[in-house]
Amino acid sequence: MKTVALIAQKGGVGKTTLAVNLAVAAGRTALFDLDQQESAVVWADRRRDELPHVEFLTDRRLRDGLSAAEEKGFDLAIVDTPPAAGSEALTAAEAADLILVPCRPSLLDIDAIRRTAQLIRATGLPAFAVINAAPHSATTLLADTRRLIADKGLPIAPVVLRERGAYRAAWPLGKAVTEIEPRGKAAEEVSELKNWVFAQLQVCTPDGVQKAGALLHG
């Protein structure tokens, strides 16, 4: 079983929305919510489906939860953390095979990445910023965002998630965008990100590797 941790010091970057959508797209996944607000758990209560398995844990119980998930045959674990570079974020980072740092294309969000990047560098684990909720047709803004994030010392995932209404429509239903609009743009972007994540973890199908490679190399 591989583990992906989502970490961001700043709130409102879409971390939990990304976590639940990635969990649904990835298939047999356990999603562990380390945030006291339990937003992912509330989403799962509305969903009432067996998968993904969603559970609140304290950071001290995370290792036990990951071990139990692996014993139960889960292919992937996703760890959602509170908006702070505290003990939960550090514990999740240390337990992960891959770290994702969601970031909206705004100066406030980019400035907040600095402390998150410092925490991640201390772990020595692979980590990537994920540009999330980007406005449509904002070429210059995206270019500036990529440059500023790179200045903070984080590489950037090649898939950009745009601001789309499907996320708002799916959340109250306990659904993912790949379920309510499987042929929509939001679903396409989430699926592309999932393929790229699997390629980083080296657990995807040959088709997934090929597509992820195409995204990385244009």
Image (tube, helix red, strand yellow):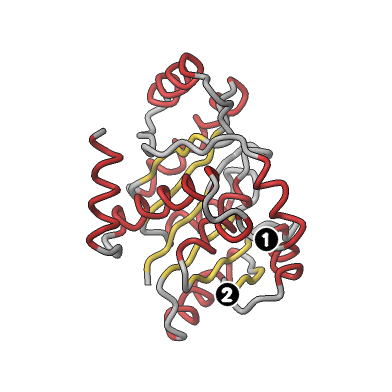
> Percent x, y for residue 41?
70, 66
Q: Residues within 10 Å of mark 1 (few under 14, many from 20)?
A: many
User: Relative to the observer, which residue lies in front, 168 or 81?
Assistant: 168
- Outermost front residue: 183
> Percent x, y for residue 50?
61, 79
Q: Which residue is mark 1?
A: 40
Q: Which residue is mark 2?
A: 51
Q: Residues within 10 Å of mark 2 (few under 14, many from 20)?
A: some
> Percent x, y for residue 205?
27, 64
Q: Residue at x 30, y 53 (%)?
A: 200
Q: Please, what secondary structure does the residue beneath circle 1 have? A: helix
Q: Amino acid at mark 2?
A: Leu
Q: Is residue 101 above or below residue 43?
A: above
- Outermost bottom residue: 72
User: Which-is-in-front pick, marks 1 and 2?
Assistant: 2
User: Relative to the observer, which residue lies in front, 59 or 154?
Assistant: 154
182 left or right of 126 in image: right
The answer to which image quadrant residue 109 occupies is top right
Q: Residue at x 27, y 38 (%)?
A: 216
